[in-house]
Amino acid sequence: MATVDTDTKSFNTPDDVKTPPNARMEFVSFGDMTIVRMTSQPGWRWSESMKAAAGTDSCQRTHFSYVISGRMRTRMDDGTEVEIGPGDIAITRPGHDAWVVGDEPCVVLDIQDASRNS
């Protein structure tokens, strides 16, 4: 019988939890890779809830995201906007603001550092 080399973890017991204003971020890590489940409440906006901690005028991280529920709108520094909702997958590059649309929490999986270019 073959041996399976698999690591498993669960968001039921995340490696780390952060609670910025109007949001909950649960982190599960495998080596250099991290998956974040972020639940943002209605009224959450990056520029109001995260900007001070980040120390930048807009978010400077790349996000590879899958939306589980709710809706999120993103405005890039150049003014272009996109809205994503349940089932959508998006890559958002640095230089953006984002906010919850509507009165339902937005739950997003953000896959960070899944691959690295050497």
Image (spheres, rainbow, N blue to C red):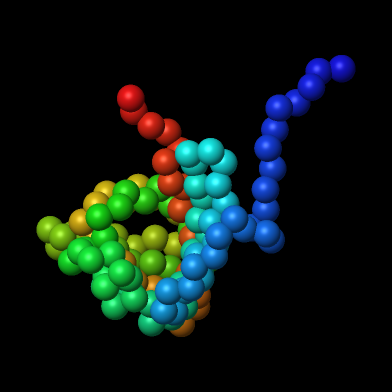
Q: Is residue 37 left or right of residue 12?
A: left
Task: Quarter of the image for the N terminus: give it.
Answer: top right
Residue under the image location 50 percent in, 47 percent down: 34
Asked whether the viewer can see residue 62, the reply is yes
Residue under the image location 55 percent in, 47 percent down: 29
Residue 40's x, y, as percent?
Answer: 46, 72
Q: How many marks?
A: 0
Residue with the most extreme top position: 1
Instruction: Examine the image and state in which quarter residue 102 appears.
Output: bottom left
Residue with the most extreme left position: 78
Residue 14's x, y, as percent?
Answer: 62, 58
Q: Nearer the viewer, residue 110 or 30?
A: 30
Residue under the image location 42 percent in, 33 percent down: 115
Residue with the most extreme right position: 1
Does 42 sit above or below residue 107? below
Asked whether the viewer can see residue 86, the reply is no
Q: Is residue 70 left or right of residue 78?
A: right
Does 29 sit above or below residue 96? above
Q: Is residue 5 left or right of residue 51?
A: right
Instruction: Examine the image and state in which quarter residue 8 appears.
Output: top right
Residue 100's x, y, as percent?
Answer: 39, 73
Q: Nearer the viewer, residue 82 or 48?
A: 48
Residue under the image location 49 percent in, 60 percent down: 108
Task: Quarter of the image for the C terminus: give it.
Answer: top left
Q: Nearer the viewer, residue 88 or 59?
A: 59
